[in-house]
Image: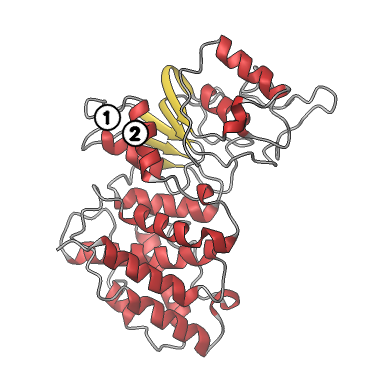
Amino acid sequence: MAIKKSELYSSLWAGADSLRGGMDASEYKNYVLNLLFLKYISDKARSNMDSEIEVPQGCFYEDILALEGDKEIGDKLNKIIAKIADRNDLKGVIDSVDFNDNTKLGEGKAMMDTLSNLVKIFADLSLGAHGALDDDLLGDAYEYLMRHFASESGKSKGQFYTPSEVSLLLSLLLGIDENTRQDKSIYDPTCGSGSLLLKASSLAGKKGLTIYGQEKDISTTALCKMNMILHNSADADIAKGGFSTLSNPLFTTENGMLKTFDYVVANPPFSLKNWTDGLSIDPKSKQVINDGFNRFEDGTPPEKNGDFAFLLHIIKSLKNTGKGAVILPHGVLFRGNAEAQIRKNLLLKGYIKGVIGLAP
């Protein structure tokens, strides 16, 4: 029987609560969600369901539970995860969290007790029969944690995820439905946990869309790749984390231009102050002088505000017949100087088809 969301959320809360004293919310969510993923792939393999992840002997969740009370639980848990990563080409994804980090989990008995309690929290959850393709299991869990703990980490919730209602709105605005062909491509240059991409793809029917995404934060990139696997989208092309889309876009063509897509969706970080990192700005003209992708033909945004930088990147990433939908702060409609000129140029070219104001 499928697990109820209330049960899942209760377990996540308990897991996060057991760790919250020792680390920031942006860190402890990764421990909880990694274990959730391990439990899911273990249960799916045990239930003889079609699984894209092979779980080696000795690496099932019951093997993790057997480490309870073991003084080397952190090191042994890392080794189990490493075996799964090696077997399934998941290096840098599920092994991105160090379960033997004494600076975050404590030393000796403190670490042993913390991890022993944490792994037990998921022991009674049955995830193998869960309809993750239709129900955003990891995405819902991620959103749940961020909604409750973003205030503790001092970071904007929008940095981590896009609410499902907003994801649905953007997808519908693009006209994606069950008649949209599978060979249509969709790209998110700031994909976070992948919720926007997955929502749009799910509207295109069982086979979905061809998915591409880039995310700068390494741990969030790992989460996104896990989320794709949980939604039967393991073939999604999620670029290696650690690189900014603006200074180092990873989806390019053989002739060095940006790869273009049928659809682009994005919820980029609002008013990013360091968006020019990795780019060179002429001190007199204030124009980007080393962008090889011609993204700033309509003007260079202010150095301390990257809203239009993301919009210009999105426009250049669209095919001639492509459609894009992006979430931006209301300030892009009214701010003057360089942004006013960019806005005018985009409107005169007919690139902007509509603006919808969302309530706070």
- Residue at the location (31% across, 73% down)? 122
Q: State the image quarter where residue 338 is shown.
A: top right
**The residue under label 1 is which amino acid type?**
Gln
Which sits earlier in the primary sequence, circle 1 or circle 2?
1
Q: Position of residue 151 (x, y in %)?
A: 55, 60
Q: Is residue 327 above or below residue 142?
A: above
Which quarter shows the N terminus? bottom left
Few, some or many C-alpha atoms within 10 Å of disc 2 (few <14, some 14-19, many ≥20)?
Answer: many
- Residue at the location (34% across, 33% down)? 210
| Residue at image mark 1 | 182
60 and 294: which is toward the camera:
294
Q: Is residue 201 above or below residue 94?
A: above
Disc 1 secondary structure class: loop
Few, some or many C-alpha atoms within 10 Å of disc 1 (few <14, some 14-19, many ≥20)?
Answer: some
Judged from this view, the residue extending furthest toward the front is 359
Q: CA distance from mark 1 to mark 2?
A: 7 Å
Q: For residue 210, which numbered disc appears in the image? A: 2
Are the residues tagged 1 and 2 within 8 Å (C-beta)? yes
Q: Is residue 232 above or below residue 127?
A: above
Q: Is residue 124 left or right of residue 99?
A: left
Q: Is residue 168 left or right of residue 222?
A: left
**The residue under label 2 is which amino acid type?**
Thr
